[in-house]
Image (spheres, helix red, strand yellow):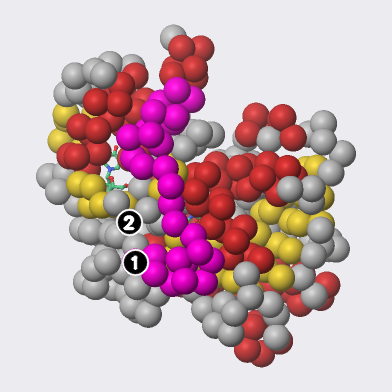
Amino acid sequence: MRILVTGGAGFIGSHLCERLLNEGNEVICLDNFFTGRKVNIAHLVANSGFELVRHDVTEPILLEVDQIYNFACPASPVHYQYNPVKTVKTNVMGMINMLGMAKRVGARILQASTSEVYGDPIEHPQTESYWGNVNPIGLRSCYDEGKRVAETLMMDYHRQSVVDTRIVRIFNTYGTRMLENDGRVVSNFIVQALRGEELTIYGNGEQTRSFCYVSDLVDGIIKLMNAEADDIHMPVNLGNPGEFTMKELAEQVGKTLDKPVQIKYMPLPQDDPKQRKPNIERATRLLGWQPTVGLAEGLKKTALYFQAIVDIKK
Ligand code: NAD
Ligand code: UDP
């Protein structure tokens, strides 16, 4: 198949491009390099099945493909709040452009949605039927509401124009190829610990997240894209149900690196969700999917990756 991955030079997108190429597909990687990097995909460029296009999804583009993975969008709060209007445009205009392409060429399209559509969730763990608790006018809204509109567009193009759609709600994912200045908690803690700096916990550190290693996530995403079922167009949660407070995560990073860690407490950002954990029964039933990499193992792999980067920059 010929497959388009938007945001393909980013953290998750680059792993997806690599896996799809290894499975014998042709891959077009489209990216505007806002948070993506050529180094993430440099090893794929020599493969004759790989093509790189510098393009912004907010602008229309004509391509002929069989499948579209729409991953273009900054994911770290630091990056998506840098230019919030652009974040909304990427989620809304980018989604319309990609759905237009899917409709024109009859391609199947999968949208990278997020657990952020649940906002600061009152239902715990979160099932796909939960409508969420989202502030429409806060600092996170450009991303949360942008992704919610993107889901709306996916469902309306499916109902109105019979586009073949898949929606994945991705819970916090980490691993190799994250930026060292990404700003998300796993990369922050690992890089800080490797540099011998204090680990920055925002708030009291009692808020929880569930962390999925990137290889598990990519497995689930490709399974979802290729799965068939009557309700396959409805959203599917993908994430690791192991739930940790940020204090526990900091301790685990110290254990993994075998280093004593010092904590620095900093103010909690606005609308920071208090708890988050996926219910993955739907993914398990539809896809036979379950994560296999635990937090300790995933942190070790990620720390090895960051160690090399921190060493180079010493
Ligand atoms: P990332 O920032 O590493 O990747 C995003 C990629 O999209 C980058 O390569 C960036 O340059 C590109 N991009 C951004 N705006 C663009 C535009 N207008 N046109 C073209 N390219 C553009 O982030 P990631 O963690 O790899 O996330 C990828 C996708 O998965 C995002 O859509 C994100 O919302 C979603 N997601 C990620 C997580 C997570 O924990 N990593 C959780 C939920 C959802
Ligand atoms: N966080 C933290 N220290 C950091 C970065 C983040 O304590 O250096 C907290 C943040 O406030 C949030 C959690 O870690 O409660 C996860 O943050 P991240 O930005 O990784 O993802 P998201 O909030 O989008 O789930």
Is the Cβ of the residue at disc 1 closer than 8 Å to that at disc 2? yes
Asked whether residue 212 is drawn in magenta, I would say no
Dot 2 amino acid type: Pro
Label annotation for residue 238: none
Which residue, given by chain and number where applicable, does mark 2 sit on?
A: 241
Q: CA distance from mark 1 to mark 2?
A: 7 Å
| Comes first in the chain, label 1 or label 2 | 2
Q: Secondary structure at mark 2?
A: loop
The x and y percentages for residue 50 are: 80, 42
Q: Is residue 20 left or right of residue 188?
A: right
The x and y percentages for residue 302 are: 44, 31
Q: Is residue 9 left or right of residue 85?
A: right
Image point (61%, 42%), residue name: 15
Which residue, given by chain and number where applicable, does mark 1 sit on?
A: 279
When asked about the image quadrant of residue 248, the answer is top left
Image point (30%, 26%), residue name: 256
Asked whether residue 287 is drawn in magenta, I would say yes
